[in-house]
Image (tube, rainbow, N blue to C red):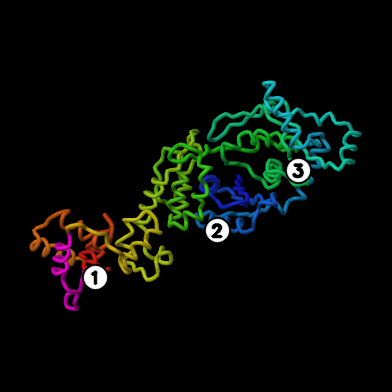
Amino acid sequence: MKLRFAPSPTGLLHVGNARQAVANALHARRHGAAFLLRIDDTDVDRSREEYVEGIRQDLAWLGIAWDELVRQSDRIDRYQAAASRLKQVGRLYPCFESEEELHAKRELRLRQRKPPVYDRAMLRLTPEQRAQAEANGKQPYWRFRLSDGEVGWDDLVQGRSKVKLGAVSDPVLIRADGTVLYAFASVVDDLELGITHVLRGEDHITNTGVQLDIIAALGGRPDRFTHAHLPLLLDEAGAKLSKRFEGLSLRALRHDGIDPAALLAYLARLGTAEDPQPLSFDELAASYDVRRVSKSAARFDMRQLLALNRRAMHHMPFERVRDRLPEGATEAFWNTVRGNVDMLSEMRHWWEVVSGSIVPPVQEGEAAFLLQALDALPPDVPERPWGERTWGEWTGALRAVSGRRGRPLFHPLRLALTAEESGPELCHLLPLMGHERVAGRLRLAAN
């Protein structure tokens, strides 16, 4: 068994293709299979080396390792050789229509209430007509002549699937400039590199039918391959997530402080009946079964991911995040704040609350109470340093002099000291902030 993840380096890796990477990697690990990373970089105009490196970094961040790395740009000779074989058996034929001509043909068929399928006019081209077209400076692009009938397979997610080849246009496999297209290069790679299982998005179902036909034309065995087509992802409102991928790149999520274990677990269980748990890669792989993925489109809910991320951080040791926290942040700070944030990026704000300067909001009618709180504030002295009991001692004394209890007592203090309506327990925050900072904020808030 051998699986592959085959991204194109034309942009940042986003949660949609990361889900496919996770599915392939977990399936491979569970079954002891090889896992190939294939960089589909035949589109020289759009492929960028920085995106190749970004893909490698993003996968490594998720905890995904690969056994083999292949770049399609290094295999051009293999595609040319395969194309020659298809030409020899008459399955790859030259075409000379322009985009304008093809558009006109499609429009005519639509007006005639016919499906806009390519009419195979170039199959009737005589050698003399081809020579004349080339003499006029035209370079042919090449289409694959699909078989008649239909192609079917048992899909691990979708169940029995089939594609009626007669309802599909003969695909272009080679452009006029000689570059190969994805449908062809992918088939050659899967055949020659020993791929057995192809897990990808349901938008490739028609491609799968076409590619199985190409495999047979190249002398391969279509039944050697097992397919699983994962449903597309939707956003919380039910719209296609593809329109919002820029904000959900792995680079952006990493920058915002999403923990890779949380994202990995969320993507692994997305679309299944299983609740995501912040587990290790091996723990997820041990129970991963792509057949449990629903045929229905799954919703990528950022709120669920953040809730899972919060759970993951709540149990995360300080040493694991030390280098991602603000400079100077201590283990005591991490232990105090980690249960009150959804992402690591929020730590910057709380570090400013603890060790920096903030502007408390104006609290109408609370000036006198805040000055009482300042007068009741216990000193921080060597013989009795501030600790977790300080908050209780302070608020107890303040309760006695002010007569306040509950929210009227605690809420003005939280606003004055943190400028937030809620947050970590103040009994833990107070020692981290220190006497001077607490007193200064009370004075500022009382003015």
Which is in the foreground here, disc 2 or disc 1? 1
The magenta-colored residue range is 366-387
Query: What residue is drawn where x is 15% and y is 71%?
Result: 378
Question: Residue 384 colored magenta?
Answer: yes
Rendered image: mark on residue 57: 2
Query: What residue is drawn where x is 20% and y is 58%?
Result: 412
Which is in the foreground here, disc 3 or disc 2? 3
The mark that comes first in sequence, 1 or 3, is 3
Q: Kindly state the secondary structure of the residue where label 3 is placed.
A: loop
Q: How many other residues sit within 10 Å of disc 3, few (<14), some (14-19) or many (≥20)?
A: some
Type of the residue with mark 2:
Gln
Type of the residue with mark 3:
Arg
The image position of residue 149, as x and y in percent, is: 70, 25
The mark that comes first in sequence, 2 or 1, is 2
Q: Is residue 195 above or below residue 316?
A: above
Q: Nearer the viewer, residue 418 or 284?
A: 418
Which is in the foreground here, disc 1 or disc 3? 1
Type of the residue with mark 1:
Gly
Q: Quadrant of residue 385?
A: bottom left
Residue of label 1: 440
Residue of label 3: 175
The mark that comes first in sequence, 3 or 2, is 2
The image position of residue 109, as x and y in percent, is: 70, 25
The image position of residue 137, as x and y in percent, is: 86, 43
